[in-house]
Every structure is written in C-alpha cells, then in structure tokens.
Image: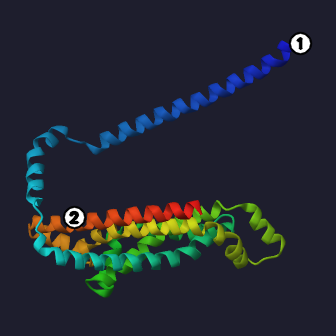
C-alpha cells in the first residue's frame, strides 16, 4: 500500500473531526446569542426612561450622604446580632447538609435514594429566603430566632449541593479498596470520603457564612432580626443618612470576612 493511501484517510478523518467541533462551537455561539436577544426583548427595558430618571437616582444617592454616625452603636449591636444569626444558621445548615449530601452522591447511594435526596435539595433551594423568614416569623415571632432558622434551612439547599459535588469527585480507587475489604456504607463515607473532601467542604462553609451575613440583611425586611431589620426601618422612615451608616458598617464587616475566608479557603486548598 502506498504511503498516500495510508495517510490520506487519516488526514481526512482529522479534518472531518475538526470541522465537526467547529460546527458545534458555532451553533452554540449562535444559540447563546439568540437566547440573549430573546431575554433582552422579554425584559422590555425602556432606555429613554432610564435617561430621564437619572436626576431622581442622583437625588436619592445625595440623600444618603453624609452618614449619620450618631447611631453607630445601634449599627454595631445590630451587626453583632447579624453575625450571631449567620454563625448559628450556617452551622445548623452545614450539619444537616452532610447526611443529605452523602445520600445524594452517585458514588455512594442507589438511584432511588439519590432521587429522593436531590428532590429534597431542589425543594429547599426553590423556596426564597424571604418566604422562609416569613414562615419562621410566624412560628417564633419577630427577631433573631426566626432569622437564624431561616438561614439554617436556606443554607442546606446550597451546602448540600456543594458537598455532594465534592463527594462525587473523590478518588474512586480508595472507595473500591474499602469495598473489597467489606467495609460498611458508613465506614466508606467516614474513612474513604470525608478525609478527602473535608478541606474543600470547609472552604464552602466559610463562603456560605460570609454569604449568610448579606442574606441576613435581606431577612430584616420581614422582621427576622439583625442589621437588616434596622436598615429597613430607617429606609421606611426616610432616614437615609442613618441607613447609610448601617450599609457602611455592613460593607466593612463583609469585606473583612471576605478577605479572611478567602485566605482560609486558599489554605485549605493548598493543604
């Protein structure tokens, strides 16, 4: 067989494969473009209205400044309550997320059990935090307990999914070694999975704690305690300077926690 008879089919195959890949890429780009155009039409944005509303936006921002520092002690106390809510809410959610993530992982659980566990995850994630706040305000009354419970349940929907993804990415060989040794399901989870995913899961938990501080401010809208309750009260009373103080205090703390949690997450990843 001639050299050209051997090499030409291979070149043709490679060329065809590259053409196929580029065709798929072009179709994906076109599809994304059409999706964005469709979404923009659905939003019905009135750009002329935005231009005419610019003076009103500027007027609102001008009312926020300067911040009223006379309520700094109130802001700090409300912030402490918010951090307490976030700490307990994240801890409750993290503890309850561990068994749910183990039951949801495809490398640990049978299909029917994974389906039920994932359905529970999706159900929790589909409930807005405001609705959870209203539910627990009805159960425990206004204040931090309602916000703490709402954050705990809200956290489950996300941390369970994060933990599940981490569990499904573990080295399969270590699990097979335990299975050969006739380890039980719990022993496989305890000795084969948890040591591998613990650093990553801790990083996810720190991120969720940081996020819950911001989410707690939203729950204040429904009276679930924390700095959000004070913030909404000042905005409803048109005391924008005091509301600005609350937002600045929240900004400083969230920025600090973000920097600290980023360092801790990088440390866990490097270890």
Residue occupying image coordinates x 60% and y 63%: 271
Secondary structure under badge 2? helix
Q: Which mark is residue 248?
A: 2
Number of other residues with Cα within 10 Å of mark 2, as a class: few under 14, some 14 to 19, many 20 or more: some
Of badges 2 and 1, nearer the viewer stands 2
Mark 2 touching mark 1, by CB under 8 A?
no
Q: In the rendered image, is residue 76 in sight?
A: yes
Q: Position of residue 204 (x, y in %)?
A: 50, 65
Name the residue nearer the viewer: 62 or 53. 62
Name the residue nearer the viewer: 65 or 215. 65
Q: Which residue is mark 1?
A: 2
Q: Position of residue 242 (x, y in %)?
A: 12, 69
Side (left or right) of 78 relative to 256: left
Image height of 168 relative to 83, above or below? above
Side (left or right) of 70 relative to 91: left
* 2 or 1: tag closer to the N-terminus: 1
**How far apart, in angstroms, are the residues tagged by discs 2 and 1?**
77 Å
Q: Which mark is residue 43?
A: none
């Amino acid at each position: 067989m001639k050299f050209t008879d051997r090499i030409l089919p291979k070149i043709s195959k490679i060329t065809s494969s590259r053409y196929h890949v580029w065709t798929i890429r072009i179709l994906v780009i076109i599809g994304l473009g059409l999706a964005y155009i469709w979404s923009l039409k659905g939003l019905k944005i009135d750009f002329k209205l935005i231009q005419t509303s610019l003076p009103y936006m500027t007027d609102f921002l001008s009312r926020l400044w300067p911040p009223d520092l006379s309520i700094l002690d109130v802001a700090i106390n409300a912030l402490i309550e918010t951090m307490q809510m976030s700490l307990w809410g994240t801890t409750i959610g993290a503890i309850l997320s561990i068994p749910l993530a183990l039951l949801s992982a495809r490398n640990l659980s049978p299909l029917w059990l994974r389906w039920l566990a994932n359905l529970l995850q999706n159900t929790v994630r589909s409930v807005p935090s405001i609705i959870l706040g209203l539910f627990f305000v009805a159960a425990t009354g206004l204040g931090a307990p309602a916000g703490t419970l709402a954050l705990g349940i809200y956290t489950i929907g996300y941390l369970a999914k994060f933990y599940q993804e981490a569990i499904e990415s573990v080295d399969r060989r270590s699990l097979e070694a335990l299975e050969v040794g006739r380890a039980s399901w719990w022993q496989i989870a305890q000795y084969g999975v948890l040591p591998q995913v613990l650093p990553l899961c801790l990083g996810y938990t720190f991120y969720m704690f940081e996020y819950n501080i911001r989410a707690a401010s939203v729950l204040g809208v429904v009276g679930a305690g924390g700095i959000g309750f004070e913030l909404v009260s000042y905005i409803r009373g048109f005391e924008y300077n005091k509301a600005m103080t609350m937002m600045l205090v929240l900004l400083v703390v969230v920025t600090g926690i973000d920097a600290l949690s980023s360092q801790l997450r990088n440390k866990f990843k490097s270890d």
